[in-house]
Image (cartoon, rainbow, N blue to C red):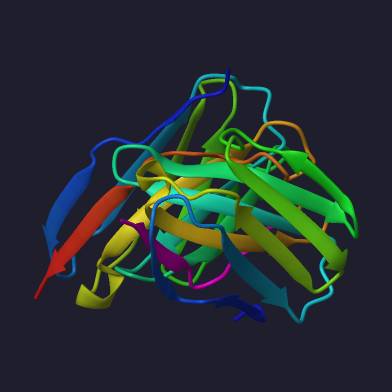
């Protein structure tokens, strides 16, 4: 398995609070991604990074920000969590235009 | 806008049966297509990646085919086993940068002993 970890694995938070999810890789891959997975919508890209400090928006980026200060870490921040952001969040990595490898996911509940 | 569809949404088969999962996409201008497996409560596991210049890829009991002109891919599973029970997703890379994969919603496969 690709060396990808996500933390925390589960989190419950209240509406309006900021939340940061962490993705850590040991593969030295250039690309990193954040997705959310929801019933009826499938997997949707939130943000991605193509290098240190190089990020871009995905399909559903509103309400989310990201940062990548090191090759191995990609952080996803919910600036002010809302109930609509209750979801399972997946991090993925890839090297150029090749296969994407996924982390185990973080289940976030916003109450 | 590229759209990916997987039909059926769920499939139940007896153990030992050979089966085919379908994936269709609306824009034939893709760079590659990837098949994933997802077990309940887990992340996605990459199964096979087919480049646009290829017609099929094989890994063990799995064979994935790609027909760009018709906008279709199939995942063939031979001699299915209960351990194959999972949700199978396909995703297309429309641009070659791998950064904006478009996913189908998956087919949930149950293999009954």
Task: Please give the name of the residue rendered at 58% of the width and 17% of the height, measured from the top-left corner.
Answer: B1
* In this rendering, position of residue B58 left or right of residue B83: right
Q: Quadrant of residue B79?
A: bottom left
Q: Is residue A8 left or right of residue A95?
A: left
Question: Residue A106's x, y, as percent?
Answer: 46, 68
Numbered range of the magenta stretch: A99-111
Q: Is residue B9 above or below residue B49?
A: above
Q: In the image, A79: left or right of B89?
A: right
> Between A22 and A101, which is closer to the camera in this rendering?
A22
Tell me the quarter of the image containing the C terminus of chain A: bottom left
Q: Nearer the viewer, residue B26 or B77?
A: B26
Which quadrant of the rendered structure holds the N terminus of chain A?
bottom right
Q: Could you tell me which residue is drawn at 42 percent across and 37 percent down?
A: B23
Q: Is residue B67 above or below residue B58?
A: above
Q: Is A103 in the magenta? A: yes
Tell me, yes or no, whether the highlighted magenta stretch contains residue A5: no
Which of the 4 quarters of the picture holds residue A69?
Answer: bottom right
What x and y, as percent, mark residue B4? 46, 31
């Amino acid at each position: 398995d690709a060396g990808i970890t996500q933390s925390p694995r589960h989190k419950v938070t209240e509406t309006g609070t900021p939340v940061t999810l962490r993705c850590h890789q040991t593969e030295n891959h250039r690309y990193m991604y954040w997705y959310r997975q929801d019933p009826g919508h499938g997997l949707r890209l939130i943000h991605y990074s193509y290098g240190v400090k190089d990020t871009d928006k995905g399909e559903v980026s509103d309400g989310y920000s990201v940062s990548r200060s090191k090759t191995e870490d990609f952080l996803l921040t919910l600036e002010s969590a809302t109930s609509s952001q209750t979801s399972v969040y997946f991090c993925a990595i890839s090297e150029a235009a090749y296969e994407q490898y996924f982390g185990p996911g973080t289940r976030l509940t916003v109450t | 806008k590229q759209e990916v569809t997987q039909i059926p949404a769920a499939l139940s088969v007896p153990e030992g049966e050979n089966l085919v999962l379908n994936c269709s996409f609306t824009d034939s201008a893709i760079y590659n297509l990837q098949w994933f497996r997802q077990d309940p409560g887990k992340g996605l596991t990459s199964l096979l990646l087919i480049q646009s210049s290829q017609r099929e890829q094989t890994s063990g009991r799995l064979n994935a085919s790609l027909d760009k002109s018709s906008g279709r891919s199939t995942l063939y599973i031979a001699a299915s086993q209960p351990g194959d029970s999972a949700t199978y997703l396909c995703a297309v890379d429309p641009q070659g940068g791998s950064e904006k994969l478009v996913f189908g919603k998956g087919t949930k496969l149950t293999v009954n002993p």
